[in-house]
Amino acid sequence: MSALLAVAQQNDIPLNRDIYYDIDRNGAEKSSTMHTGMRPIIQSRADLKNVMGFRPDSSRQYYWITEKLFKEHLIKVKDGGFKLTIDPAFQFELGHDYREGSDYSDNAFMQHNGRGFHIAADLGPTVSFQSSFYENQAVLPGYLFQYSQVYGVVPGQGRIKSFNQRGLDFAWATGNVSWSPRPWINAQLGQGRHFVGNGYRSVLLSDNTTPYPYVKFSTLTNNKRFQYTAIFAKLQLVGEANRLPTGEAGESLFYWKRATFLHLSANIGRLQLGLFEGTMWKNIGANGVLAFNAMQLNPVIGLNTVVNGFNGANTQLLGLDAKYKITDKAFAYGQFALTDPDRNRYAWQLGMQWFDIIRRDLHLLAEFNEATPFAYTKPNARMSWTHDNQPLASPIGTGYTELVVRADYGIKQRFWFQGELSLVKHLYGYAMVEVPGGDIFGPDKQTSITGEERQRLFAGVNASWRMNQMTNMQITLGYSTRDVDPGTIGRDSGYLYIVWHTGLFNRYYDI
């Protein structure tokens, strides 16, 4: 049966963990040659066996409306080599925060009204495109509202405009054109996010931020032993403090910076090993835009680090990611990110995933992450490892340790139960922006100011009925709790919610 999300061979598989749960299970097989360390994965390079949105659906529906609601795309056109699907994308959520302690605790009723669409098309066997857009109005739990007031964005979703004291208006858009003139090469132009790694977090590059414009090139050897990816992106910071002083537009541009992300992946038996290099280029100086540096187009991994070093005006990150297949149902994974070897600043990750434990669709992930104080920071705070005021690696930022445990259990691919736990020790909470070493936008060296270490617990459970695999449409009932110690008013949460939504991207609210 036609797939998702997947009418087009060259489209990216939407970066959502529900979908990649099946892909990671296929990638755990010792015989698999699929490269999973750079995401999203192009459909033509993925093992789509039994993946949500691509698996056969033999259910019988007797009416047109039930076919569209539970089984098919809303609109589907196929004419020769041309294929097109159009689907609604939405988030309709109601909830109540029973531990809301902010100034707005007299009204702890929450809601999220998000409406949009998802379009995917195949213009023959080599060219594909897709696009998604959401317009949102929301009243979010207190800790997310306060985060948005400090940083000017809803985590991972967009710049905010406030209304009615507590309401937030924000939009989210992504899309790309993907061209594979030969099976071994792919080129893309678009706006989106990327993720390096095989776990829940990434200490290198994650999909935690809002989408950014990019150009991407990727090559794959015929034997699938090596895959090389080069991404050239444009990042920015938002907020009035980051407006550029000049400009002819009615709304001046924000401070921006180009970025280069290079990744080399190699299959070595059961081991998949990746080398990552990230560079942020300083493009704005005291007198305006700096002269173009041809090294910003360099596609050779490692060369930018050699030329720039770690302590120059540009920002360098060098890292490794690895996955080792223990059995056909389990793999261990890890990462290491080096941001400043002279001052011993780095981050690392170690984790494991098990699939089909005892019975099919019982899954467990356990992961530990750590970043040293001042990792990802720069003397020029605008050159920190960030985009749209959000960390490009873990949403926790820097100066932290974190334990993550997640469990999933599915019944007949229709009913899913999930549990999550995140324990964090952190030098910085967003009410402590002056604490050095824990603020990714703060000073990059110790000062006379000292801060206390915070502990943050986030836990949640939910149950979902997955209605339509084509857009991961589901109805979910869940509860999440957040405790910060020591913390100020409004940092804790006990959120009970019900939501009808499509799941085509990840949201990180466990911050």
Image (spheres, rainbow, N blue to C red):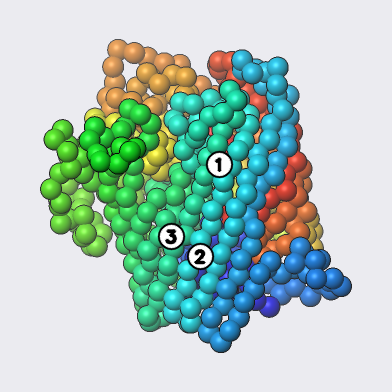
Q: Residues within 10 Å of mark 3 (few under 14, many from 20)?
A: many
Quarter in which the C terminus is drawn: top right
Quarter in which the N terminus is drawn: bottom right
Residue marked by disc 3:
38
| Mark toward the viewer: 2 or 3 | 2
For the point 60% across and 38% down, the residue is 137
Q: Is residue 235 above or below residue 89?
A: above
For the point 47% across and 73% down, the residue is 128
> Which one is in front, 436 or 142?
142
Q: Is residue 144 above or below residue 93?
A: above
Which amino acid lies under the numbered mark 2 shown in the image of this protein?
Gln
Looking at the image, can residue 357 be seen?
A: no
- Where residue 494 appears, as percent x and y from the top left, is 70, 27
Which amino acid lies under the numbered mark 3 shown in the image of this protein?
Met
| Mark toward the viewer: 1 or 2 | 2
Residue marked by disc 2:
130
Q: Is residue 177 left or right of residue 78?
A: left
Looking at the image, can residue 288 be seen?
A: yes
Residue marked by disc 1:
508
Q: Residues within 10 Å of mark 2 (few under 14, many from 20)?
A: many
